[in-house]
Image (cartoon, rainbow, N blue to C red):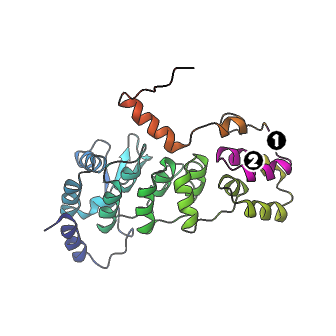
Amino acid sequence: MSVVAEVSVVLMSSAGTPRGSEPKLKLAHGDPVAVSLITAIHGGDLDSLGRLVAERPELASARMLGRNGLEGGWRTPLHAAADWPGYFPAAPAAVALLLEAGADPNDDTGGDRPETPLHWAASSDDVDVAIALIDGGADLDTPGGSIGTQLDNAIGYACWHVARLLVARGAKVDKLWHAAALGMVDLVEQMLAERPDAVGEVSQAFWHACAGGQRRAAERLLAHGADLNWVPGYAEGTPFDAAGGLDTRQENVLSWLRERGATSAKPPG
């Protein structure tokens, strides 16, 4: 019997329990079972992951506590699949396996800024994991993350692939800086017309339009009075600096290459 089939048998035996309604198993930091779960997920070992949740279905939704205990928050196996830096081998398949075993895609991390697994995928631009989570029932507009909603995180961390996925799947684009960063010029125009008192938001939207490489949106906002050299309190640099920066996915790939000893053929400077 395959791993997924084994998990399905277990699920049939516990049918009728709504996902997310049962008490969550809590595993202390460093618990051997938690370590085994994370090792299997990060290593792409679906056979081991499948055996773990087939033997103990409650592990699929376990809350693995942080170093400071429950008050310091936790992560679930789905969070582990979406954890920074993302792109773990077979992570989308691991998400699907965990969801089939009963994992709750909308469980959060607790603490002061609770985040769902989709928040984490949105913060690393791991679009394949984000697709698996959304297909599995992840909510798209959960507030409270490190920046806010999943779309707030995706745009705020320059994770353009997940940002566009979220919008395509129905996430709300209700902030001027969202529309500007994604180059939604018609929506920018509409928001400016409907909210003439949004002058304070224009420079912020201009900064994000530049960060997203959205010249038409940037031109419209500059004409509307945006500060050409505005610097946000939550990031470094002017719009010019933001336009010249790398997005999260590019930075991630560069870090991965450097860790493996890759070098450039271009002369320094």
Judging depth in this view, the residue of 199 and 27 nearest the camera is: 199
- What is the x, y in percent for residue 198? 82, 55
**Tag 1's secondary structure?**
loop
Q: Position of residue 125 (x, y in %)?
A: 49, 50
Which element is circle 2 on?
helix
Query: Is residue 9 toward the left or the right of residue 69 in the image?
Result: left
Quarter of the image for the N terminus: give it.
bottom left
Neighbour tally class for label 2: few under 14, some 14-19, many 20 plus, Cα within 10 Å: many
> Residue 207 in magenta?
yes
Residue at x-position 55% and y-position 62%: 166
User: Which portion, as a residue range, is magenta?
Assistant: 205-228
Q: Quadrant of the C terminus?
A: top right
Q: Which residue is mark 1?
A: 227
Q: Looking at the image, tell me whether mark 2 or mark 1 is earlier in sequence order.
A: 2
Residue 180 falls inside the magenta stretch: no
Task: Give the numbered dot on residue 155.
Answer: none
105 shown above or below 240: below
Q: Is residue 251 above or below residue 180?
A: above
Q: Residue furthest top?
A: 268
Q: Describe residue 230's horizontal placement relative to residue 169 as left or right.
A: right
Q: Which residue sits at x=48%, y=47%?
A: 124
At 42% from the left and 26% from the top, the residue drawn is 263
Tell me, yes or no, if residue 266 can be seen here.
yes
- Asked if labels 1 and 2 touch by Cβ distance under 8 angstroms, the answer is yes
**Residue at numbered disc 2:** 206
Along the viewing direction, whichever of 142 and 126 lies nearer the viewer: 126
Q: Position of residue 145 (x, y in %)?
A: 55, 52
Q: Position of residue 268 (x, y in %)?
A: 53, 20
Classified by dominant secondary structure, the portion drawn in magenta counts as: helix
Name the kind of residue labelled 2 in the image: Phe
Please state if 232 lies on the left or on the right of 100 as rendered: right
